[in-house]
Image (cartoon, rainbow, N blue to C red):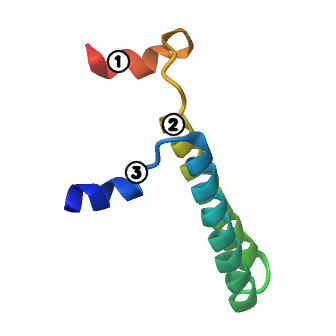
């Protein structure tokens, strides 16, 4: 039963990845706005940028993990661990 429950949290398609990225972005913007209220000035803006930057990195990783497997589009670094 736990395996079936765990399958609900696996991101399989790019649409699901986009939905997760959207949710992460909303949370990051909300957190960034709290930082701007708490730390006015350059410090708040730097923390705001860090929140949104984390979403860009996580989003890139999610989209990379859900791309279709097309061996012609692979990079040499993708194949390095399979030798």
Residue ranking furthest to the left: 1
Find the distance from the CA under tag 1 to the CA under tag 2. 19 Å
The circle drawn on residue 80 is 1
Find the distance from the CA under tag 3 to the CA under tag 2. 11 Å
Question: Are discs 1 and 2 less than 8 Å apart at CB?
Answer: no
Q: Secondary structure at mark 1?
A: helix
Q: Mark 1 Cα within 10 Å, few/some/many (few <14, many 20+)?
A: few
Location of residue 79 in the rendering, given as x and y in whole percent from the top left corner: 38, 17
Q: Going 79% across and 81% down the picture, which residue do you hit?
A: 41
Image-based side of 51 in relation to 44, left or right: left
Location of residue 73 in the rendering, given as x and y in whole percent from the top left corner: 56, 14
Up-down relation of residue 10 to residue 48 (above or below): above
The circle drawn on residue 10 is 3
Is residue 50 visible to the viewer in this orientation of the structure? Answer: no
First in sequence, mark 3 or 2: give its number.
3
Q: Secondary structure at mark 3?
A: loop
Give the mark count.
3
Location of residue 53 in the rendering, given as x and y in whole percent from the top left corner: 64, 57
Q: Mark 2 Cα within 10 Å, few/some/many (few <14, many 20+)?
A: some
Find the distance from the CA under tag 1 to the CA under tag 3. 25 Å
Location of residue 8 in the rendering, given as x and y in whole percent from the top left corner: 39, 57
Up-down relation of residue 65 to residue 59 (above or below): above
First in sequence, mark 1 or 2: give its number.
2
Q: Going 73% across and 81% down the picture, which residue do you hit?
A: 33
Residue on which the image places disc 2? 66
Q: Which of pointers 1 and 2 indicates the residue nearer the eye?
A: 2
């Amino acid at each position: 039963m736990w395996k079936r429950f765990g399958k609900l949290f696996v991101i399989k398609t790019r649409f699901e990845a986009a939905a997760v990225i959207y949710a992460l972005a909303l949370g990051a913007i909300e957190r960034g706005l709290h930082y701007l209220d708490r730390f006015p000035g350059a410090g708040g803006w730097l923390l705001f940028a860090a929140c949104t930057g984390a979403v860009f990195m996580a989003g890139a990783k999610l989209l990379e993990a859900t791309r279709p497997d097309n061996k012609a589009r692979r990079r040499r670094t993708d194949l390095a661990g399979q030798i």
